[in-house]
Amino acid sequence: MTELFVTAIVADNLALAFFLGMCTFLAVSRRVATAVGLGICMIVVLGLTLPLNQLVYTHFLRPGALAGWGLPELDLSFLTLVCAIGLIAAVVQVLEMLLYRYVPELFDALGVFLPLITVNCAILGGSLFMVERQYTLAESAVYGIGSGIGWALAVIMLAAIRERLEFSRIPEGLRGLGISFIVTGLLSLGFASLAGAG
Amino acid sequence: MSTIVYSLLLFVAFATLLALFILLARRWLVPDRPIAIRLNSDRQITGHFGQKLLQALNECDIHLPSACAGAGTCGLCHVHLTHTAPPPTPIDKALLNPDQIRSGERLACQLSLRTDIEITLADEVLSTSSWQARVVCNRSLSPLIHEIELAADTQPFQFESGDFMQLTAPAGTTLLKDVDPGDTHRAAWQSLNISQLGVRSEHPQTRAYSLANRPEDTQSVILMIRLALPPAPGVAPGVVSSYLCTRRPGDRVELSGPHRGFRIVDESRELVFVGGGVGMAPLRSMIHRQTARQHALPMNFYYGARTQADLLYREEFDSLSAAENGFSWTPALSEPDPSWSGEQGFIHTVLRKQFLDAHPVPASCDYYLCGPPLMIRAVVDELHAAGVQDTHIYKDEFG
């Protein structure tokens, strides 16, 4: 379990090993404060949706899941994608309402990227990996929280570096997204070197 | 076959559950509860949770000045929060200065009502009225610019040069074929080929227009409206400007004001007015005001337009500058026809050549600018290059 957790954070990092959720990753990494907020949102959404999707998959969609209902032959696993997206969308929408009510500053700072978490590939990717790797409920919860922490860590690191870079002399053509791509690549190399640390 | 039926059943049940979950969460998290807004600690009005303060005030017939109608670009609708102000939004930070933010001022159009609040408003805001004004006259000054005269609610109409009014177009459809371009501009209007266009608005829309009143115009509200053309093919023209340009004498128009705009600050300095297009309106009002007060030092008016047809109030300013009362005006055309003998080019270059380069101390004058944002930026750059400090540049941008 510990190994799964550490691997999800470091070597299997969704942002830096699989390059998932790049649009949010690059767009909301200008300020550390916002990146921390987004990171927490990602941890919450991944930590909630993965076990929930695992439950939906094992109890309704997986081949033979409905054997108890007298339908042992039924295989509804082709509905995994659409059910996963629906569930993620619902969780994000509720999260959005929670932030609006209790942390309006973060709600304003995240802007349109909050609803866009719905279609963030990192979150859907997490759910699909969970199905592919056949995690149990406990494993998927650990994997969800771990990969959420990994993604948050990556976006906060990138934001911290980008804040520092604002005062550096960067060649004109590389300013903004150009240098962010290079930094992301270097971060990715760093994370890859930690493979096997779990 | 059974797979199709079961998958449909399962998916419908799943989606229904999710919808129920969201509805319950909404009920719990986003309640439609009333929020109390205390004004100057003696009056109380009610808004809804999540509503913008500006909208809540408007619904209670309190009209804050707002040139952009809540879009967050003009920075005029600031209110003072008496006790605790919420953290400033990025738009607050961009449009208010740090002192204002520290003292608890926020933009009403950016403030969402989440808890009961207490605000302080100036008395002049509370006394600003809104009324249905009768259109007295609507004539076209150029193919796209109309001068609209509305009957004032009080006689005499109390205003200060530089003030602006807010006009509201009701929901509905406006067709540009109803625009009366007048005999002088009919050919030019038809050549624009836009009379088949129309615009539809689902909600009432409000826009701000500067007063073009001279001091003696105390019976009516005089506004200059430029028909906002579609920025790209397939896009509708401006809602409020189309509505206003199609008004006929006798129609009623909802308006509020006057709201405080930019003002003549120091009458003991040489004044330079730079305008473009309908930026003429507040400058015309200011120039007439200063002429009537027998401004002691020279006044110069630089006005940029495209063609001769776009030169507004030409005779009026020609006769004003011929009166030798220290006023001179320099119109410049960017797309002149061969019959034009005056200045050519953009107004910022003409201003530099004719005024800044020739004047012994350009920094000793006050500059009042009104026009499109690009023109303002170009003029401000020229003024900076001539050594003029920002404290002597007053501007009213419209975008």
Image (cartoon, helix red, strand yellow):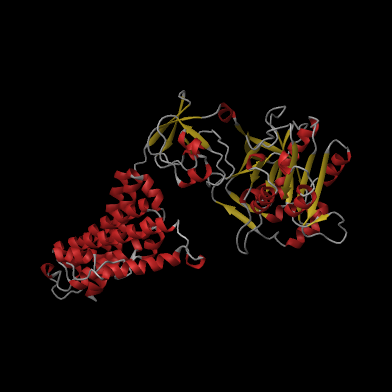
> Residue B288's quadrant in the figure?
top right
Q: Residue furthest top?
A: B42
Residue B318 horizontal side relative to residue B35, left or right: right
Query: In x, y percent, where is residue B188?
Result: 78, 59
Query: In x, y percent, where is residue B158?
Result: 69, 29
Q: Is residue B246 visible?
A: no
Query: In x, y percent, where is residue A171?
Result: 49, 66
Q: Name which residue lies at 40% across and 50% down.
A: A109
Residue B176 horizontal side relative to residue A128, left or right: right
Q: Name which residue lies at 34% across and 44% down.
A: A101
Q: Is residue B294 above or below residue B343?
A: above
Say how many tags the image has.
Answer: 0
> Residue B131's quadrant in the figure?
top right
Q: Is residue B3 above or below residue B81?
A: below
Q: Name which residue lies at 78% across and 29% down.
A: B293
Q: Is residue A167 visible?
A: yes
Residue B132 horizontal side relative to residue B70, left or right: right
Query: In x, y percent, where is residue B5?
Result: 25, 71
Q: Nearer the viewer, residue A126 or B341?
A: B341
Q: Name which residue lies at 47% across and 43% down.
A: B110
Q: Nearer the viewer, residue B82 or B215?
A: B82
> Residue A51's quadrant in the figure?
bottom left
Q: Is residue B268 above or below residue B320?
A: above
